[in-house]
Image (tube, rainbow, N blue to C red):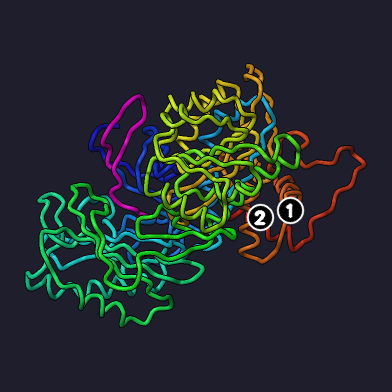
Amino acid sequence: MKKKEIITGIVKRVEFPNKGILETEEGKIVVKGALPDQKVSVQIQKVRNGRAEGRLLEVLEEAPDSNESPCIHFGKCGGCSYLTMPYVKELGLKEQQVRSLLKPAVERNSIRFTWEGIKTSPVKYAYRNKMEFTFGDEIMGGPLSLGMHKKGSFYDIVTVSGCRIVDDDYRAILSATVDYFSPMYDKKEITFYHRMKQEGYLRHLLVRKAVRTGDILIDLITTTQEEHDLTGYKDALLSLQLDGRIAGILHTKNDSLADAVIDEGTEILYGQDFFYEQLLGLKFRITPFSFFQTNSLSAEVLYQTVRDYIRSLYDQSNIKNDGVVFDLYSGTGTIAQLLAPVATKVIGVEIVEEAVEAAKENAKLNHLDNCEFIAGDVLKVLDDIEDKPDLIILDPPRDGINPKALKKIIDYGVNYMIYVSCKPTSLARDLEIFQENGYMMSRAVAVDQFPWTSHVETVVLLSKGEIPSKKVKVEFSLEGMDTDGFKDGATYDEIRDWVQEKYGIHVTNLNIAQIKRKNGIIERENYNKPKSEDSSQPGTTPEKEKAITEALKHFNMI
């Protein structure tokens, strides 16, 4: 392969987060933005050690099982990646990515480990409870746009009036905002903020909506470079027929150079600057700038998983249920408050001061008096905390844990930790250090917080074990564990979900294993086989056999 050479091939797999892998006669090519099973045209940009990196020129053929995108902006907007993939296939892709990244840690493990698959989001569309739209233009000098960055661009903005990861109220508010400001923009009476020139007025539109109550906050973010009367804009919003209720309309000033929403003073144009949201029975006060999981219903799945992991420890009497819990990188203290009823004391540490203040307010709101929240860097704050933890919860930012902070955390010597990760590559890196210091994975599960995007959460239970030897013993659960399909094909979960979705039939792992053997797909020794020759196992009905056979064909396994 040579630089600038154009090569055509099929995307065999996608590595986290968006690295499509083409395996051609010329060698392996990595191309960002391609989807599994697409036929693509790629221009080589870099070649090193038999591995090339290329730029996606064109999708020549979609995957055989691809769907028509439900969003008119897909492909142009940079927000979603997987809208044309069947959701079952997306889940399988994310699970495989996480398992692949955790594979080195599994091989280093010296205690029994259970992989628990991937948990789905309860809602697949209109799941976001917060959006930050950006003002700009789609082409230089074009009409006013408000929405998301164009795919692959830092400057061009696509007006996403048909976005499917938000509900109708978001779309109505976005369209009303564009309609109100566009005539002023056309007459040169108002401008949008140019990042390069650092000039202009309109910057962002922030919208939040509570899932439980339907309350809505709308915040227009501008610079102070111009002055405009926003009364007409407020009235235009209040005239909208929405499913939810507008709790507040705000105007925030932001003159910072960073391309981010930063509060440098907020004026209330209507109503109030907060609403309340509920998660797992707890009440939270949300402002425009509160840190809060952007998929409320899937956040409940995530936090319930953490709670279940802890409950399993209590049930096994491995730890006392009246100890001290550290919630490090605690945000607004959601996890800390969920654990407060079963702990003597919970200490949350978070570097964002506003999030800490919100955590304190929310703890009072939920009548929890055993939560302490400290503002500061985990690396520095741990030196000043006199309490010693019995259990540690870790929910770090995307970059993972500072190695120096990690050492201090490990030095506490607690028997169990729970690591909540929003970036599996950072998790894999941190796990190596944990395992070198005797902490092994005993349970792990992926959680799909953000359908149709490349993001995936992972929850890992770490147990204090022995330093791993060269000989590794690993035990997996049967769920999702098909070693044949792991490399080329589908997992048991994918096959089962496909059959359920296509035929409305529930099949078991045993059913699938029997039909796979019948079609010549050899399982590893003794996998789902009778313990003795004269043992009997439940048979698979003709209806289930037909459905499973079709699934195997669908996943190109037969």
Which disc is residue 500 wearing? none
Residue farthest left in this picture: 188
Task: Measure the alpha-carbon separation of dots 1 and 2.
Answer: 7 Å
Q: Main secondary structure of the magenta part?
A: strand
Residue at image position (77%, 61%) is 542
The part of the chain drawn in magenta is: 43-61
Mark 2, secondary structure of its residue:
helix
Residue 315: image location, x then y, percent: 75, 42
Between 271 and 262, the one nearer to me in the picture? 271
Task: Say which quarter of the image contains residue 443.
Answer: top right
Dots 1, 2 in contact, CB < 8 A: yes
Q: Is residue 25 visible?
A: yes
Between 95 and 553, the one nearer to me in the picture? 95
Above or below, 275 relative to 399? below
Residue 74: image location, x then y, percent: 35, 61
Which disc is residue 508 wearing? 1
Q: Label 2 neighbourhood size at 10 Å, few (<14), some (14-19), many (20+)?
A: many
Residue labelled with disc 2: 496
Q: Amino acid at mark 2?
A: Arg
Q: Is residue 13 visible?
A: no
Q: Name which of mark 1 and mark 2 comes first in the sequence.
A: 2
Q: Is residue 331 magenta?
A: no
Q: Is residue 50 magenta?
A: yes
| Position of the N terminus by quadrant | top left
Q: Amino acid at mark 1?
A: Thr
